[in-house]
Image (spheres, rainbow, N blue to C red):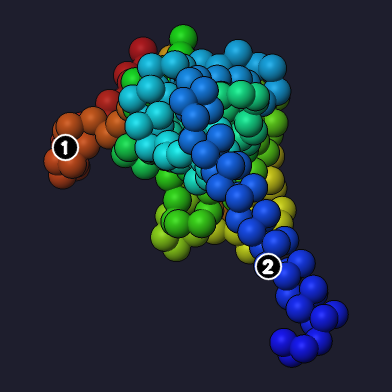
Amino acid sequence: MWHDVRALNASASSLMALTVLAVLASIVWWLSQLPMFSLRAVTVESMYEIPLRHVNELTVRNGVIGKIRGNFFTTDLEQVRATFETVPWVRRATVRREWPNQLIVEVEEHEALGTWGDDRLLSVKGDVFTANLAEADDDHALPAFEGPKGSEKQVLARFTELRTLFAPVQLAPQALSLSERYAWTVKLDNGMSVALGREQDSDTLKKRVQRLVGVYPQLVARLQEGRIDTIDMRYPNGLALSSAALAVPEDASKPVKPAKKKPNQPNKTSKQT
């Protein structure tokens, strides 16, 4: 090799190239560590130009900025994105760099539809998330939902369907529950609770609600001022209901005494003159 001029020249060229690359890498690394490239700002924007209601500068400062590591060049954008998506109310986030020293984060917020169980919220897209329930309060009470794990989108779909089905009688669902045995119960805005039972097919709930809607005006007319408390629609050809207006009187449980018979009176005969 030492007598091969071409091999020596090739080796020398390779060493020179490696040295230049090492020097350039060192210069790039040194430049990247300059204070001017330290992150100075993290700007949070709405993903769809919809004003953010729950994610603000204070939320970012307290929950995210302290967890970001590195500078403009070395920050792991995927790690920053994942950190933002742990913030309450954040459904999705995207992150990009903006020269020379800031990050731009676009955020999509959850839009709460109602509560889920005791301490979580259900979004309009069927996502269950954890946030301060007090922050979700609006001008009206949120509907209440509950169901087995993984049934969130099914519950949302049924809620949307029930709102349409009860609209003809000016009623709206305020709570919807799916039991562990997959039986449905809906509570309406007039305080009435309706047991709809399990679904035998895709039209089971629809048929039961339509049957209730068909007779509901007659039930209200019969009870007049009495409010219906519960209705059970699980019967194939009928229903059962409870109402304070149909309460059994307290003395109804006492045995009924037979009426006393009057003694026979003698027949009167008329005298003819």
Spot occupied by residue 193 in the image (x, y as percentages of width and height):
44, 36
* Tag 2: amino acid: Leu
Q: Nearer the viewer, mark 2 or mark 1?
A: 2
Spot occupied by residue 103 in the image (x, y as percentages of width and height):
57, 27
The quarter of the picture where the N terminus appears is bottom right
Residue 20 against residue 261 in the figure, above or below: below
Decide if residue 59 is on the left or right side of residue 212.
Answer: left
The residue indicated by pointer 1 is: 260
Front-most of residues 25 and 235: 25
Please tell me how crowded label 1 is: few (under 14), some (14-19), or many (20+) other residues with Cα within 10 Å.
few
Q: What residue appears at the point 72 percent right and 61 percent down from the top-left corner?
A: 17
Distance CA(mark 2)–CA(mark 1): 127 Å
Residue 247 against residue 151 in the figure, above or below: above
Front-most of residues 251 and 101: 101
| Of callouts 2 and 1, the N-terminal one | 2
Q: What residue appears at the point 80 percent right and 74 percent down from the top-left corner?
A: 10
The residue indicated by pointer 2 is: 15
